[in-house]
Amino acid sequence: MTKAIVGIIGGSGVYHLPGLEDEREEHVSTPWGEPSDSLRFGRIGGTEAVFLPRHGRGHRLSPSGINYRANIDALKQVGVTDLVSVSACGSFKQELDPGLFVIIDQFVDRTVGRDASFFGNGCVAHVSMAHPVAPLLAARLAKAAEAEGIRYKSGGTYVCMEGPQFSSLAESLGYKAAGYDVIGMTAMPEAKLAREAELSYATVAMVTDFDCWHPDHQHVDVAAVIKVVQANAGNAARLVARLLRDFPADHEPCPDGSDTALTNAMITAPEARDPALMQKLNTIMGRINR
């Protein structure tokens, strides 16, 4: 069995993880560039955790300026097996009101300017994204939310827009008509890269607003969002702390296939693979290269 190490990527308003014991900080370099910040290591209960603020301390990185590949590679390097993403989002449904946590199970990618894969010319791979969220990890998050009395909904579709601007009314109405649940700017390509890295991945989307479709909430601005984000941050800390306290010592093999996503994904013949790219892929493909 593989020891479970839980990675936490904190989004807007979640820049540290309260309650970490034996905390230490380490800078981790990757062949894809620098991650958003130093990694912070520690434990809660008997579970080891690694925390990374997605936007960097002080929120200095735009959603489009985050080095998602470096973030995932760095977390994989230090042994993370299960990855929880926490992010702010807007809602397309009246019942998904500000303050509610949505444990996502599907994504729609509307980003256009981001490096969305570790693979490419020189080594082509196609991983399945049919079921992008690890069901056991999502279930543990729901159980933790229930235990802490945090309002949540299990399941939902997160549409990821490029940003950094908020939606136009036409976009908002279109996404609502399509039946999507929430909208944010950071889950993609993070979820895709986590799958390529064979990490169990789950997203907790913290609703901050109704986007701009709602007739009583037509304008989304940073001040309104931050007010709810700050209120959500305490609940996010409680949720993660409970998750870690109750987490199993060993990583649970994931029924969605995330642990073995690369087994049949590569199509480039071994003799045709680019050695320079293969070197960069050393951490991501570590299981296969051994």
Image (cartoon, helix red, strand yellow):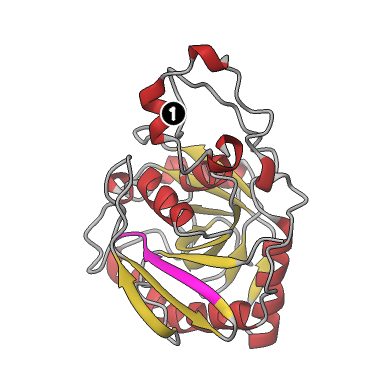
- Toward the viewer: 188 or 119? 119
Residue hosting label 1: 278
Secondary structure mostly taken by the magenta-highlighted segment of the chain: strand
Give the quadrant of residue 115: top left
- Across and down, in percent, residue 256 comes to 74, 47
What's the residue at 52%, 13% (across, down)? 271
Q: Say if residue 185 shows up in the picture.
A: no
- Toward the viewer: 158 or 46? 46
Give the quadrant of residue 217: bottom left
Crowd band around label 1 with a 10 angstrom C-alpha radius: few (<14), some (14–19), many (20+): some
Horizontally, is 136 left or right of 14 in the view? right
What's the residue at 62%, 57% (across, down)? 104
Quarter of the rendering occupied by the C terminus: top right
Horizontally, is 112 left or right of 159 in the view? left
- Across and down, in percent, residue 212 comes to 43, 55
- Across and down, in percent, residue 175 comes to 54, 43
| Count of marks, rendered view | 1
Give the quadrant of residue 219: bottom left
- Toward the viewer: 156 or 38? 38
- Helix, strand or loop status at disc 1: helix
- Across and down, in percent, residue 28 comes to 32, 57
What's the residue at 36%, 36% (across, down)? 114
Q: Which residues are magenta?
A: 48-55
Up the image or down, 158 lies above or below 13; here it is above
Q: Is residue 53 magenta?
A: yes
**Label 1 sits on what residue type?**
Met
Q: Say if residue 266 shows up in the picture.
A: yes
Q: Is residue 88 magenta?
A: no
Up the image or down, 61 lies above or below 131; here it is below
